């Protein structure tokens, strides 16, 4: 190295100073790995939702799976509204007559809707009291064809509403007695009459429907050529088993 040669010209750069050209981003994207995010869960593979709709739950899922969401909505709307007005009326008004009228109207609408609309559409049952020419009254029950079963979600929500709300009114009756709120007791008694009438009526209608189904199954034994002793045994077994489960 000569003394006249500058020192900087003798030092070579470690890396070229020319900036890399080309689609650098695409190369890095190809080499980069997709990050994996692990989230803790206790659900099994069979319970995992495959679609966004399956991931929804709660009230929205119930109405989405219902075959008659409008009937299901009004079944709960009238019952919840009657209890809500009864419980919260003292916070908004001191007019006892207004509260009584609103609650009675809601109870009457619920009674009619449950017996004529919700019961028929949700579980395929209907009942009413009829008076014959001799002046004797008797119950009449109707049920849908057993070959067309009710939606499981509709049936479950219907029977829950049918049995839970009478229990709530019984609890409100006990509270009224403990608080000496005797002025509200007639409203609670009327609510219990409406609710228990529907509960008992639909319970017997459901029992009658199952009994008819048992009779049709037993009668089908004869059409299948199981007459004689075999048909009698099958008929008696089916009737006894259904009667033991659902009562007389």
Image: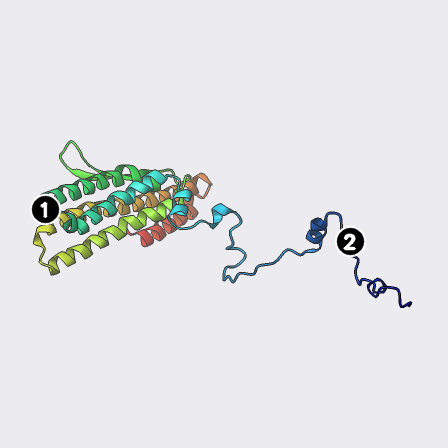
- Residue 219 to residue 247: above or below: above
Residue 193 lies left or right of residue 122; in this view the side is: left
Please tell me which residue lies in front, 136 or 75: 75
Q: Which mark is residue 96?
A: 1
Q: Secondary structure at mark 1?
A: helix
Which comes sooner in the sequence, label 1 or label 2?
2
Q: Which residue in the structure is indicated by mark 2? A: 18
**What's the coloring here?**
rainbow
**What is the tally of numbered marks visible in this picture?**
2
Give the residue drawn at x 70%, y 53%: 28
Residue 55 lies left or right of residue 37; in this view the side is: left
Give the image quarter of residue 149: top left
Mark 1 vs mark 2, CA separation in Å:
90 Å
Spot occupied by residue 165 in the image (x, y as percentages of width and height): 24, 51
Spot occupied by residue 172 in the image (x, y as percentages of width and height): 18, 55
Mark closer to the observer (1, 2): 2
Q: Secondary structure at mark 2?
A: loop
Near mark 2 (Cα within 10 A), the count class, few <14, some 14-19 or many ≥20, is: few
Near mark 1 (Cα within 10 A), the count class, few <14, some 14-19 or many ≥20, is: few
Spot occupied by residue 116 in the image (x, y as percentages of width and height): 27, 37
Residue 134 visible in rendering: yes
Please tell me which residue lies in front, 156 or 9: 9
Give the residue drawn at x 29%, y 45%: 76
Residue at the far top: name it: 133
Give the residue drawn at x 23%, y 45%: 81
Q: For the N terminus, which image quadrant? A: bottom right
Q: Which mark is residue 126?
A: none
Tag 1 near tag 2, CB within 8 Å:
no
Please tell me which residue lies in front, 15 or 125: 15
Give the residue drawn at x 17%, y 40%: 105
Residue at the far right: name it: 2
Spot occupied by residue 4 in the image (x, y as percentages of width and height): 89, 65
């Amino acid at each position: 190295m000569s003394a006249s040669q500058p020192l900087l010209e003798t030092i070579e750069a470690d890396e070229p100073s020319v900036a890399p050209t080309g689609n650098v981003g695409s190369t890095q994207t190809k080499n980069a790995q997709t990050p994996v995010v692990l989230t803790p869960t206790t659900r099994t593979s069979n319970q995992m939702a495959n679609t966004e709709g399956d991931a929804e739950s709660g009230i929205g899922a119930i109405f989405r799976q219902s075959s008659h969401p409008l009937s299901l909505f009004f079944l709960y709307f009238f019952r919840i509204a009657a209890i809500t007005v009864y419980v919260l009326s003292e916070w908004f008004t001191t007019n006892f007559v207004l509260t009584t009228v609103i609650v009675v109207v809601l109870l009457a609408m619920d009674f009619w809707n449950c017996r004529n609309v919700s019961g028929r559409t949700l579980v395929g049952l209907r009942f009413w009291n009829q008076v014959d020419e001799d002046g004797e009254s008797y119950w009449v029950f109707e049920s849908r064809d057993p070959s067309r079963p009710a939606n499981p979600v509709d049936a479950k929500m219907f029977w829950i509403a049918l049995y839970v709300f009478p229990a709530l009114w019984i609890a409100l009756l006990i509270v009224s007695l403990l608080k000496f709120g005797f002025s509200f007791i007639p409203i609670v008694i009327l609510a219990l009459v409406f609710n228990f009438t529907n509960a008992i009526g639909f319970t017997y209608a459901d029992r009658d429907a199952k009994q008819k189904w048992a009779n049709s199954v037993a009668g089908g034994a004869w059409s299948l050529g199981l007459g004689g002793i075999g048909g009698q045994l099958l008929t008696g077994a089916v009737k006894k088993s259904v009667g033991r489960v659902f009562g007389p």
